Image (cartoon, rainbow, N blue to C red):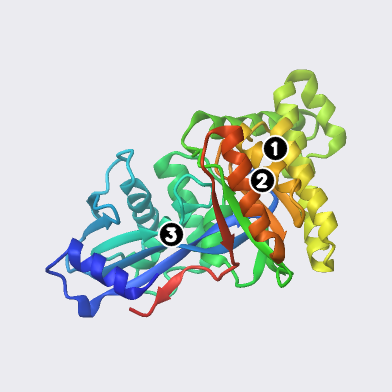
Amino acid sequence: MDAAILRTALRDAFPDVDLATMRIVRAPGRVNLIGEHTDYNDGFVLPVAIDLRAWIAFVRTRDRRVEIVLGDGARDGFDLDAIGEPRHGWIDRLAGMAWSLGELGLDLHGLRGVLLSEIPMGAGLSSSAAIEIAMAWALRDERPPLAPMKLALAAQHAENSFIGVRSGLMDPFASACGQRDAALMLDCRSLDYRAVPLPLDPYALVACDTRAPHRLESSEYNARRAQCEAAVEIVARAHPEVRSLRDVTMDMLPAIGVIDQVARRRAEHVVRENERVALAVEALEAGRMDSVGRLFAESHASLRDLYEVTSPELDALVEIAVATPGVVASRMTGAGFGGCTVNIVERGAVERLRHAVEREYPARTGRQPAIYVLAATGGAGEVAA
């Protein structure tokens, strides 16, 4: 986003501020290649930070007040010394991040700022995590405001303990730690991660948006986590060493099914999805894109049949994509219940996929899609104003 656009937005929102002191921070969204609903089960994920970002242009103030204006003119704020309870509005993500950083005893500064985002809301591309990570960069003078992994953990704490969404680490991790031209394989238990170079010279990374937004605050997301915890509790009766679904093996699943068939299905998805992440990394590093396509297909089917988080719109987009010549891999990405699919496409076939989706998806669903050709980018930071 051009600094001039941000400068104009800040001037219009706060006419009295000194634009000579303006600063700009940004944080990327993410698309997860594979490893869905595994992060909060101590599993493995393979996200990519993407070149759709949340931006905050701001000036420091001498008081302890944070005032933010959105691109549509909505305005809200909070006092750093009296953040209070969540208000169930957009400001909660920003206030929650400030609250979480305050819990760590960090020095924070008041500001007047504008928040503009290129990340479509509700598309499953982690707009919320990007906003939180960008806010942390705005509130702190230190660069980075925290070590990137600690910053991601602080954002997760804000989601879990302030917002009340029991989300995992993957989204803020990708936004804080992303690397250009690479996916990141993260072990959500040890927090070890490594870059996996993406062979995207002959391929493009494409997200197709259902335009059927999901809401993570809905009961369905938290219900899935509770079902996973129920599965762990059942297995741990006979295997006390089991602490999460990361520790569960396929031979343990029948015992879960005797007591709770729903929990068994959720557990089977997570166990097999963790295996698929490791196999996908091997396939990407070896350039075996046919294997990547097979693993994407297995992941989507598992999310549809075992974890039950796809939707008719997501299924339609995947079916359209896999029937399009030149599409190597396609599956839903993110929490589900709407949002996006992620697709690996031969570069010469991107427009073919776009035309197929724009022609067939509205006829099947009554909705107009959006298509984003993405690049893998670095994590959050400050840029020249």
Residue assigned mark 2: 36
Q: Quadrant of residue 4?
A: bottom left
Camera-near label (3 vs 1) is 3
Answer left or right for 190 relative to 9.
right
The label on residue 364 is: none
Residue 287, image x, y percentages: 82, 67
Figure quadrant of the C terminus: bottom left
Residues at marks 2 and 1, CA–CA distance in whole angstroms: 8 Å
Q: Can you see residue 225?
A: no
Q: Amino acid at mark 2?
A: Glu
| Residue positioned 69% across, 65% down in the render | 347
| Residue positioned 87% across, 34% down in the render | 251
Answer left or right for 166 relative to 348.
left
| Residue positioned 84% across, 67% down in the render | 286
* Crowd rating for badge 2 (residues with CA inside 10 Å; few <14, some 14–19, many 20+): many
Answer left or right for 344 relative to 6.
right
Q: Can you see residue 250?
A: yes
The label on residue 303 is: 1
Instruction: Name above or below for residue 356 compared with residue 238.
Output: below
* Crowd rating for badge 3 (residues with CA inside 10 Å; few <14, some 14–19, many 20+): some
Q: Secondary structure at mark 2?
A: loop
Figure quadrant of the N terminus: bottom left
Camera-near label (2 vs 1) is 1
Q: Secondary structure at mark 1?
A: helix
Residues at marks 3 and 2, CA–CA distance in whole angstroms: 23 Å
Considering every residue shown, the one lying at the far right of the view is: 251
